[in-house]
Each structure stands twice: as structure tokens, then as C-alpha cells.
Image (cartoon, rainbow, N blue to C red):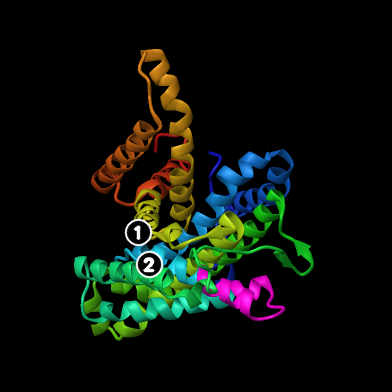
Amino acid sequence: MFYRENGQFKTTYRADQQIFPIAQDRWAVLLIIAAAFIVVPMISSGYMFRAILIPFLIMSVAALGVNVLVGYCGQISLGSGAFMAVGAYAAFNFFVRVPGMPLLLAMVLGGLCSSIFGILFGLPSLRVKGLYLAVATLAAQFFSDWMFLRVKWFTNDAPSGSVSVSGLQVFGWQISSPTSKYLFCLSILVLLALLAKNLVRGAIGREWMAIRDMDVAAAVIGIRPMYAKLSAFAISSFIVGMAGAMWGFIYLESWEPAAFSVDLSFKLLFMVIIGGMGSIMGAFFGAAFIVILPIFLNQFLPLIGGVLGIEVSTAGISHAELIIFGALIVWFLIVEPHGLAKLWSIGKQKLRLWPFPH
């Protein structure tokens, strides 16, 4: 009853091709964005910004990029952490070595370097797929770990291999407080989410989905597999590289190659699987789940242990987190392969008829 489309007539092609053709969706998204920009900074604490909101925003950007490649184009990637590392270190070198380099431009250039790196390691996708492609992208992860650890030029000749940034500003706006960092990350997330949404619903997005469903049939009807696959790798790596630059500059501020290990690549893949492959909304669901679950377990498991008279250690909480992640991934793959986004879509469909049975 609250999600009816009665009276919402489309009289032009432009109206029919809107990003959110249903008025309820359109207003809900606008209200959420307005609340995120206005209400959340007013009611959130410094801990909330640093521990939950800023990691959630950056991981949402990274999950968007991974979802473009894995969910929409069907190319399995285990090198997302490497693409984030390339984006972070490239942005760092542009920012440090070029006098007066603006922060936003350094991040965009870092994303472009990550895009080139992604195309390079996406070339095997023209000949292999599935598990073999996953191994090929995993090679990018090991190569980036070696490159940033051994080649001192990338770390500005730092003896420890650790790099740091300071004095961040955009158009004279100092990005130092938790609130300013949150608003900066939120602005980039909104822009990149809008970019990804428009891409996947356009001609290039339809090519990606055709390659995902059956690449041989897509080639028969005139879609160029090389262009479709490499463009997916390029755009995905650009978005993931931007997320890597934000992760290093905004969240960590000081980092080393271990910050972008293979564990991060697996975590990003888990976000896509749990959130929903082939869904922009799924990137947000997956990022929220991965960011909030460890914090929830750290607070909840000791309480359960106290009630049962069992002492729960930090290592036990970490192991429980891995067990729950694995169990949920198996459950989603078996019960609902399209993840939380599909459950959300089913709920919306039911609201169109509720409370009537027909």
C-alpha cells in the first residue's frame, strides 16, 4: 500500500529512463542523501566517524568497483587489494613529488594509474576465465606486494617502507577533523555511485552483462569481448584505486604495503557476495555488513560469554568473525546467490501488494 505506483505515468522516453523511475525510490534516495550530509554530522561522535562511518564509505566505493567487474561483467578478481594499493601509492607520489598538486587531482591520477594496472592484469581475461582468471588476478596482488615493499622509489625512499600524508585540503577546505573527512568521503561516494549507476544501465553496462551471461553468444551478436572485458577492468580498477587513495589519505594517513594485503582482496569479494552481485545497492549492504559485524561481535560476544560463564578472548572473537563470514558466504551462495540486495528487492515487491493478498 505504501509502495504503489498508481498514477505514475511515463509520457516521455526521458521519464521512462530515469535512474529511479518510481517516485518513492527517488524521494527515499534524496532523503537518505540529505540526512547523510546534514543530520549524520550533527548527531555522530568522533568514534562513530573513525570506526564506522568513514570505513563504511570508503569500503562502499571499493565494493562498487569490484561489483562492476565481478557482478556485472562476471570476471572473478582476487587482486582488488593490489588495485587499491596502486591507487594509494600513485596518488601519494603525485601529491608529494609535484609541488602544489591538488588532493582531488592526485587521487584521480592515482585512480588512472590503477586503471592502467588493471588493464595490464586484465589481459589474461581475453583467453582464460573462472578459476584461472582468479589466479591471474591474484598474481597482481603478489606483484604489488613485492613492488611496493622492494622498490623504494614508490615510498619516496622511506627506510621503513611506511608513508604518510598531512595538510590535506580541497579548495581551501581543511580535511583534518572527523566531520570534514566524512563529508569528503561521502561526496566522492555519491559521485562515483552515480557514475557506476549510469554506466551499468547504459550500452556499456549491457555489454558487460551479456559477456557475464554467455560470452560466446555475446560475440555472435556483435559485442567485442576484448573491449567489454578490458573496459570493465579499467573502470573497476579506477573506482577501486580511488577507494585505495581515500583509504590511505583519509582513513589511515600513514600506511605500508601490508595495509593492502590479500586479506583485503578477499574481504572486498565477500562484500560483493554478501551484498549482492550485479547490484549497486548490494555494494552498500555488503560494506555495511563487513564493517559493522566485527564491531558488533567485539561488543556482543563478551556479553554472551559473561552470561554463560565463559571467558572470550580477542583471538576467539577474531576466529568467530572468520567462521561467521564463511558460514554466511556459503549460506548466501546456496540460498540466495544475489545476496542482501535480492532480499531487499523481494521486500519491495511484497510492499507493492501489502496488505492485500492478490
Q: Residue at x 53, y 44 (%)?
A: 3
- The answer to the question of whether label 1 and label 2 lie on touching residues, with beta carbons closer than 8 A, is yes
Q: Judging from the image, what secondary structure is the residue with disc 2 in? A: helix
The label on residue 213 is: none
| Residue 104 lies in the magenta stretch | yes
The residue that label 1 is drawn on is 262
Q: Is residue 157 left or right of residue 186?
A: left
The alpha-carbon separation of the residues under discs 1 and 2 comes to 9 Å
The residue that label 2 is drawn on is 145
Residue 124, percent across and down? 26, 79
Say which of marks 1 and 2 sits in front: 2
**Position of the C terminus by quadrant:** top left
Magenta part mainly helix, strand or loop? helix
Residue 165, percent across and down? 63, 64
The residue sitting at the right extreme is 172
Start and end of the magenta stretch? 88-107
Residue 31, percent across and down? 66, 49
Q: Judging from the image, what secondary structure is the residue with disc 1 in? A: helix
